[in-house]
Image (cartoon, rainbow, N blue to C red):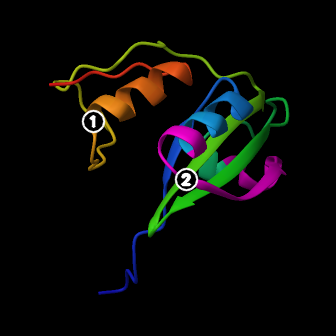
Amino acid sequence: MPIQSFSHVGICVSDLDRSTTFYREVLGFRELFTMEMGDELTATMEVGGGSEPPIRFESRMLARGDVRIELLHWLEPTADGERERRPMTQFGMTHLCFRADGVDELLEVAERAGGAAHPH
C-alpha cells in the first residue's frame, strides 16, 4: 500500500491565536510551526486561481503524540460558513474525539478557555 502513515487533520478557524490557545492549554497540543501560504497552494486548497484574486492563509501545525492538527486561518478570501456544531447525521467530518482522565476537570478547563463541551 502506498500510504505510509496518517499526516494531519485541517481545521478552518476564525481566530488563529485563540484556537491555538484552546488546543494547547485544554487539549495539550504543542505548536510545531506557522507559515503564511498563498497561490502556490491554489489547486490543493480548491480556491483561487485563474482570474480570481490571490489567496493567502496562515497554516499552524500542532501536535500531540502522533496526532497532528493544522489550523487554517484565511486572510484572502475570508472564510465563511456556519459556525454551528454539525449534526452527526451530516456527511463529512463531524467531530474530534479524545480520551481523558478526569472529564469534569477537562470540561472546566475547556470552558475557562472559551470552549464548549458537548458531553454525551
Tell me the tag on residue 16: none
Count of marks placed on residues = 2
**Residue 4 belongs to the span the image colors magenta:** no
Report x, y in % for residue 54. Answer: 85, 36
Report x, y in % for residue 4. Answer: 40, 84
Q: Quadrant of residue 75?
A: top right
Report x, y in % for residue 63. Answer: 55, 60
Q: Which residue is mark 2?
A: 29
Q: Looking at the image, can residue 101 be seen?
A: yes
Name the residue type under label 2: Phe
- SS for tag 1? helix
Report x, y in % for residue 49. Answer: 75, 41
In the rendered structure, which segment of residues is drawn in magenta?
Answer: 24-42
Q: Looking at the image, can residue 47 be seen?
A: no
Q: Which residue is mark 1?
A: 103
Is residue 13 shown left or right of residue 66? right
Q: Quadrant of residue 108?
A: top left
Q: Which of 73 and 51 lies nearest the eye of the viewer?
A: 73
Above or below — where is 93 with respect to 112? below
Q: Which of 63 and 43 lies nearest the eye of the viewer?
A: 63
Is residue 111 shown left or right of residue 103? right
Instruction: Compute the Cα span from label 1 to label 2.
Output: 17 Å
- SS for tag 2? loop
Q: Earlier in the sequence, mark 1 or mark 2?
A: 2
Q: Which of 119 and 35 lies nearest the eye of the viewer?
A: 119
- Residue located at (78% from left, 53% from top): 34
Q: Residues within 10 Å of mark 1 (few under 14, many from 20)?
A: few
